[in-house]
Amino acid sequence: MKLRFFPLTLELRHAFTIATASRTTTPAMLVEIEHDGVVGYGEAAMPPYLGESQATAAAFLGRVDLSRVADPFQLEEILPAIDALAPGNTAAKAAVDIALHDWVGKKLGAPWYRIWGLDPAKTPVTSFTIGIDTPEMVRQKTREAAPYKIIKVKLGGANDREMIDAIRDVTDRPITVDANQGWRDPAEALRMIEWLASRGVVFIEQPMPRAQFADTAWLRERSPLPLIADESVQRLADVRRAVGVFDGINIKLMKSTGLREAHKMITLARALGLKVMLGCMTETSCAISAAAQLSPLVDWADLDGAVLIKNDAFAGATIVDGKIRLPDRPGIGAVKL
Ligand code: MG
């Protein structure tokens, strides 16, 4: 098997601001795995605040040697060996995982939703994300989000109530809130959540800093809205820690090291009674289409990453009337443009 990789800088349609950072581009790395006349595609998307870069991805991918892989279908053998090459590097590992799944699916002539036995009609609606912004811009972005059934808004800045009021000036559709660890005081967070519940908010993602498990558990006991872990839960081994602290988890391929572990995280979360959300970074339709293969299994999806960029390098899963539509193509369902 031959592995190739190419840097790509994703250009965002709007500057994107969350409680901890603001940016206009996202560095990414595209991966191709070729063997036996078939090419599998993968992608690492690396928002800078998570610590990976095109340089770290290139260094990691340079250490991945697939030349001696005898049976590319043995993903349960190959992927743990790649994971063991170095700690971290979760997006770079995801790129290899996605490309290998794409290759296997193409060889089998089946999309992954079918290999996993999922009903493509059961894909969820996806939210459209609005970053921290002025009320004027929030009203404009809410109008742009008209086709979406759920608005996801980033809070944890200085103007949380203004942002919600600006959305409510335009629409009464359900809102989900992502505080991105932005609320530090549990009593204040509770007052904010009680107010948000009165404004038609459905759930709160990562209200408090990732390591404040005791404060988050205190908040959850009193919160009128479900709390969903994002930054607090990255990989399979973290899922158990969410029990009693959060009501659900947000799984992203770039945190989980790809599809294989994400699928296991969904299974474990279900067994532990947790709700499941499937999220993304700003990504091309390559990684988004890969994640979409899992979407019939989850309660909520936030897979708008490819819509937020100007230079998508792939066509794949689409969003029709706010709902994810899986292409009838083998592998992850993405084709290079
Ligand atoms: Mg989040």
Image (tube, helix red, strand yellow):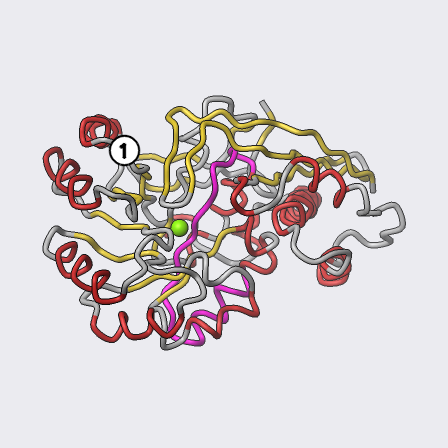
- Residue at the location (27% across, 66% down)? 186
Q: Residue furthest right?
A: 68
State the image coordinates of residue 168 (x, y, percent, origin top left): 12, 40
- Name the image quarter holding residue 15: top left
Where 148 falls versus 214 (above or below)?
A: above
Does any portion of residue 81 appear in the rendered image?
A: yes
Q: Quadrant of residue 61?
A: top right
Q: Is residue 280 magenta?
A: yes
In this rendering, position of residue 230 left or right of residue 73? left
Q: Residue at x 41, y 30 (%)?
A: 308
Residue at x 53% of width, y 52% of height: 114
Q: Which residue is mark 1?
A: 133
Segment tinted magenta in the rendering? 263-286
- The quadrant of the image that shows the N terminus is top right
What's the amino acid at mark 1?
Asp
Q: Position of residue 295 (x, y in %)?
A: 43, 51
Q: Is mark 1 within 8 Å of ligand 1?
A: no
Q: Nearer the viewer, residue 320 or 180?
A: 180
308 vs 103, left or right, is left
- Tell me if 180 is positioned left or right of 79 in this view: left
